[in-house]
Amino acid sequence: MTRVFNFSAGPGTLPEEVLLRAADEMLDWHGSGQSVMEMSHRGKDYVSIAEAAEADLRTLLAVPDGYHVLFLQGGASLQFEMIPMNLIQGRAVADYIHTGEWAKKAINAAKGLADVNVAASAEDRSFTYVPAQSDWRRSDNAAYLHYTANETIGGVEFGGIPDVGDVPVISDMSSNLLSRPLDVRRLGLIYAGAQKNIGPAGLALVIIREDLIGIGEPAPPAMLDYATHAKARSLYNTPPTFAVYVAGLVFQWLLENGGLVAAEERNIAKARLLYDYIDGSDFYLNPVDKADRSRMNVPFRLANTELEADFLAGAATNNMVELKGHRSVGGVRASLYNAMPIEGVQALVDYMADFEAKKG
């Protein structure tokens, strides 16, 4: 069997070591005689899996005391609505930074639940940069400030966490959480769909500061209330048990391979390899400001866009898949998540050079 290099933006590639271990334990987890998928979510075996996953995640991110880690469902998209429902008190305003399609979805979801102030937008340049914080038009007494740390479609990534004083900072980190070290103390709430750097689709991860729980006015329904899930330790209803288990294996894999410092070093090397080739060629183009380029998702176009279909077809025959750009923008997109080895990026660059030599 030949494994392809999967450049999908999500569900993304997973570490082969994790997949092999999950396969080995599929029918019999640690002598239990059953698969994790068959376990009671309230039984001691699954509870031990979830507790170990949380402990390893806390170690990876150095999550301080006073923060809850929640394993939820509904993806990041449900969080677009849970956040204003839980953090808005009355009709208080919330500030949002608009850097692309996923920020837009968060903004539109919040508008039905709160007064939303778009404090900054990169729409004027087709979402190819992060607006300078000095240009942001923030509200007085905002309930929170929300930003999308990495835009998978446009390939724009914040280089750091915005400093907005005492205002709680909320971040959608679906596509770059665990790709670099992170100072959790500077954030009020982090949320992420799992299917990029964390694990299989079906799991949403939320890390929330204690003082942001139970303040929504009016109080959200039980299933949409962070207080419900914090009190029940993510066991209020049946969680996505197998996804939590595989996420736990990913956390272990990261810890065994140098943690997030080493992960960042690998990700910098992979991104540099691809961007350097694009920048050195007139055949391929990336429109994003260099300072704001994503390490995780690299969109690019061919100067002759009529060649893109041939480029994608040729890549597939060379065992490089899911390189087609998002349907809203077209072109090509290579996602370089933690589990993408540098050998995959080198194979892509070699193919790009060969294609250019033949078609340029």
Image (cartoon, rainbow, N blue to C red):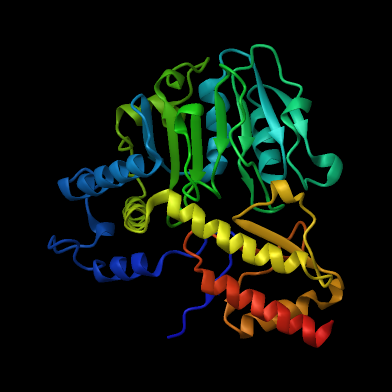
Is 231 on the left-hand or right-hand side of 334? left
Taking the image as shown, residue 203 lies to the left or right of residue 49, namely right
Left or right: residue 145 versus residue 119 is left
Q: Residue at x 14, y 64 (%)?
A: 33
Total numbered circles: 0
Image quarter where the C terminus lies is bottom right
Q: Could you say where residue 305 lies in the image, as x and y percent from the top left?
A: 85, 71
Q: Give percent across and percent down for residue 93.
A: 66, 17
For the question of whether residue 331 can be seen, the reply is: no
Q: In the image, what residue occupies the spot 20% across and 46% down? A: 48
In the picture, the quarter occupied by the N terminus is bottom left
Q: Is residue 211 above or below residue 345?
A: above
Residue at point 32%, 57% (across, down): 256
Decide which of 281, 37 is in the foreground and name it.
281
The answer to which quarter of the image holds residue 348 is bottom right
Residue 272, how many percent across, how many down? 63, 61
Residue 30, quarter of the rendered image: bottom left
The answer to whether one can see residue 165 in this image is yes
Position of residue 10 measured from the top left corner of the image (x, y, whole percent): 55, 59
Asked where in the image residue 331 lies, by quadrant, the reply is bottom right
Could you say which is closer to the camera, residue 220 or residue 65?
65
In the rendered view, would you say 57 is above or below 20? Answer: above
Depth order, front residue of 155/240? 155
